[in-house]
Image: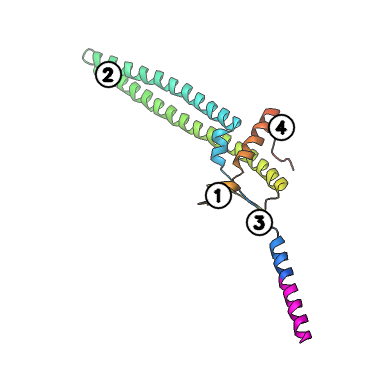
Amino acid sequence: MKLHVVIMQIVLLVVVNLGAVAYGADVAKIGIVDLQRVIDTSNVGKRASERIKEQGRRMEQTLKEKEAELEELEQTLDQKAVVLSQETLKEKKRELRSKTNDFNSLRKRYVERLKEMNVNLSNRIRDEVFSIVEEIGRRGGYQLVLERQIGGVIYAPTAIDITDKVIEQYNATAASGTDTRKTD
C-alpha cells in the first residue's frame, strides 16, 4: 500500500511539473502593421502625399491651359471655315488634330509620371517602415509581424497592432534625419 501511495505522489508530481513547463513556455508574440495607415498618417507619408498632389495640381493647370488653347483654335477654325480656302482649311484641321494628339499624349505622360512618383515614394516609405518594423520586432521580442493587407490578415485584435509604434518611431526617425534603411 505504501508503494501505491509513493507512485501516486510521483505521478502527481510529474503531472504538476509538466503543467508548469507548458504554462511557462513562451507564447508566440505576433504583431500586425497597417502600412496604408502608416503612409496616410505619418509625417513622411503626409509630405509625400502633398508632393504628389501639388505635382498633380501643376500638371492639371498646364493641361487646362493647353485645353483652352485647343478650344480657342477649334472655335477660330469653325468661325473662319467659310472664308478659308479648301487647302488652308485642310491644313488648319490637320494642325488641330496634331495639337489634340499632342495634348492627349501629354495627359498620358502626366498620368504615368504621377503613377511612377506615387510608386517610388510608396516603395521608399515601405522600405523605411519595414526597417523600423524589423527593429521594433527584434526589440519587442516578436516572432512574427504581418502587414495587415498584404499579409492576408482578415481579423486581428488591436492588442497586436503595432502600427502606432511604427508611426511614432518613423516620425521620430524622419525628424532626426536618420536613414532607416540598412546599408549591408
Q: Residue at x 73, y 40 (%)?
A: 183
Residue flagged by tag 4: what amino acid is it?
A: Thr
> Secondary structure under badge 1?
loop
Whichever of labels 1 and 3 marks the residue nearer the N terminus, that label is 3
Q: Position of residue 108 (x, y in %)?
A: 44, 31
Residues in magenta? 1-15
Mark 2 or mark 4: name the one nearer the start of the chain. Answer: 2
* Amino acid type, callout 2: Leu
Magenta stretch containing residue 2, yes or no? Answer: yes
Q: Main secondary structure of the magenta part?
A: helix
Q: CA distance from mark 1 to mark 4?
A: 32 Å
Q: Disc number at residue 89?
A: 2
Tell me the amino acid under the disc marked 3: Ala
Tag 1 residue: 157
- Between 95 and 125, the residue placed more toward the observer is 125
Among the two numbered marks 3 and 4 on one chain, the one whose residue lies closer to the N terminus? 3
Q: Mark 3 and mark 2 in contact? Answer it, CB < 8 Å.
A: no
Extreme residue in the bottom direction: 1
Q: CA distance from mark 1 to mark 3?
A: 15 Å
> Magenta stretch containing residue 126, yes or no?
no
Question: Against 20, is 179 above or below?
Answer: above
Q: Which residue is mark 3?
A: 28
Neighbor class of circle 1 (other Cα within 10 Å; few <14, some 14-19, many 20+) is: few
Q: Which quadrant is home to the N terminus?
A: bottom right
